[in-house]
Image (cartoon, helix red, strand yellow):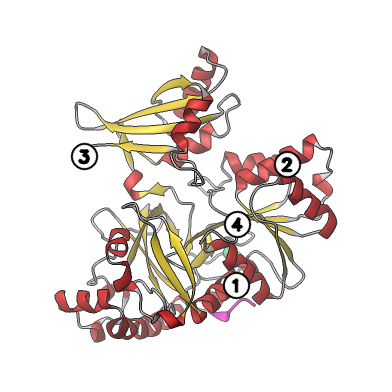
Amino acid sequence: MTPSIEFSSKKEQLDNQMMKLAELLLYLSSNSSFYRNLFKTQNIDISKITSLETLQQVPFTTKDDIQSFNDDFICVDRSKIIDYVTTSGTLGAPVIVPQTDNDLERLAYNEAISFACTGGNDLELYQLTATIDRRFMAGMAYFLGARKLGAGIIRVGSGIPELQWDTILKLHPTALIGVPSFILKLIDYAEQHGIDYKNSSIKKAICIGEPLRNDDLTLNSLGKRIKEKWDIQLYSTYASTEMGAAFTECIHGRGGHLHPELLIAEFVDLEGRPVAEGEPGELVITTLGVEGMPLLRFKTGDICRHYTDDCACGRTTLRVGPILGRRQQMIKYKGTTLYPPAFYDILDNIKGVINYIIEVSTNDMDTDELLIRVGTTFQDNTLEKEIKDHFRAKLRVAPSLVFDDPAIITKLQFPEIGRKAIKFFDKRTI
Ligand SMILES: [Zn+2]
């Protein structure tokens, strides 16, 4: 299933991308009112954009652009749209991403070759522990990808550990697809109910939604906690609705591999200039082969490092390290650049911390101030010392801590029913 382009030279990959970019630019100039207008107002001659360097003259597309002019980004007539997915926007209302039949085919292809990157083939039986509906893209992508690969997939959906284990014991799936913290819950459930999970049919997990690795690509505490209990192979993935594609690790776990025929990836600093390999930068993507809502130089807001050396698996494709955080969530605290996920990784792994929120605000000196509110039933000095020691050891700083009733923190985390928990509150004024 793995396409030969993943093993071809960088030049061949780039040539293929540039050919597809030319098609995309023509497609956008005829079908996207947003980009047609952009090319006109910026005096961009699309026939001159033939390289990564010339592509840089095209201004970035932001999530706010898509949110403000959502309809202008849609390139197809309503009759061609099969599926609508939405993704949260920064301005309140969700962004609508319509999918044509070809887009669903592209999604299936992306996921099939991503599964192949994790050693998947027609013998694999996946258990999907993520939701397939609610206008999300991911669950459906996994289903379509498994089908294209010729593998099996059981759509258990999110939650319900009892049903998950019932399925594992009855149908013997070989791989889980899910959020790493949910895998921990499955382990807990198995331990409480005497299920011999270590000898179950599950041999690997395709992990979504949460990072598994530290900046240096070693397993983070979440990854380690799973691995210590349950020695299955963990594969980290990074994907987004706007990309309609995924970066997926191979068995060597050296960052998620790009599918060059589906995306052009750039990595930029705060001023929009390219960053060097191995440096943190914001991922900017250009979608290749998308019909419904193709994007040109879309700023994902996600900060990561990228690597271009050949991987031990033989693939020559670019790889991205774990997402360090969101660009907008970058915190400058006492001279250190921090992103909230680094705090999550520590707090998620301290016994006694039931839940928490992180607040950043602007202090009198116009710099970032951090406050961590921890929900716990053990409010004593030893817990405070333990948390601060972990922060100092891993992040080199120890922000202020206050303890609260876990019920109060839960209320703060879920201002809207049915949405994801909010753990980071940005109250900065500048
Ligand atoms: Zn690899």
Give, as a single range, the part of the protein colored magenta: 1-5
Q: Please give left or right for residue 360 compared with residue 417 in the image.
A: left
Q: How crowded is mark 2: few (under 14 residues within 10 Å), some or many (20 or more)?
A: many
**3 within the magenta span:** yes
Describe the element under mark 4 as helix, strand or loop.
loop
- 386 lies above or below 310: above
Q: Say which quarter of the image contains residue 222.
A: top right
Q: Which of marks 2 and 4 is nearer the N terminus?
A: 4
Residue underneath mark 3: 430
Tell me the amino acid under the disc marked 4.
Thr
Q: Give the distance between the C-alpha atoms of the residues marked 3 and 4, in whole angstroms.
A: 37 Å
Residue linked to disc 4: 131
**In which quadrant is the C terminus drawn?**
top left
Q: Which of marks 1 and 2 is in front?
A: 2
- Ligand 1: image quarter: bottom right
Q: Which percent across, then down, holds residue 139?
A: 59, 62
Q: State which tag comes first along the sequence, 1 or 3.
A: 1
**What residue is disc 1 on?**
113
Residue 380 visible in rendering:
yes
Which element type, helix, strand or loop, lies under badge 2?
A: helix
Q: Residue 8 carries which label?
A: none
How crowded pointer 1 is (Cα within 10 Å; few <14, some 14-19, many 20+) is rated as many
Disc number lying in front (2 or 4): 4
* Residue 248 appears anywhere in the view: no
Tell me the distance, in whole angstroms, between the alpha carbons under discs 2 and 4: 20 Å
What kind of element bears circle 3?
A: loop
Q: Residue at x 24, y 28 (%)?
A: 363
Q: Which mark is residue 187?
A: 2
Q: Which of marks 1 and 4 is in front?
A: 4
Q: Nearer the viewer, residue 384 or 404?
A: 404
Amino acid of disc 3: Ile
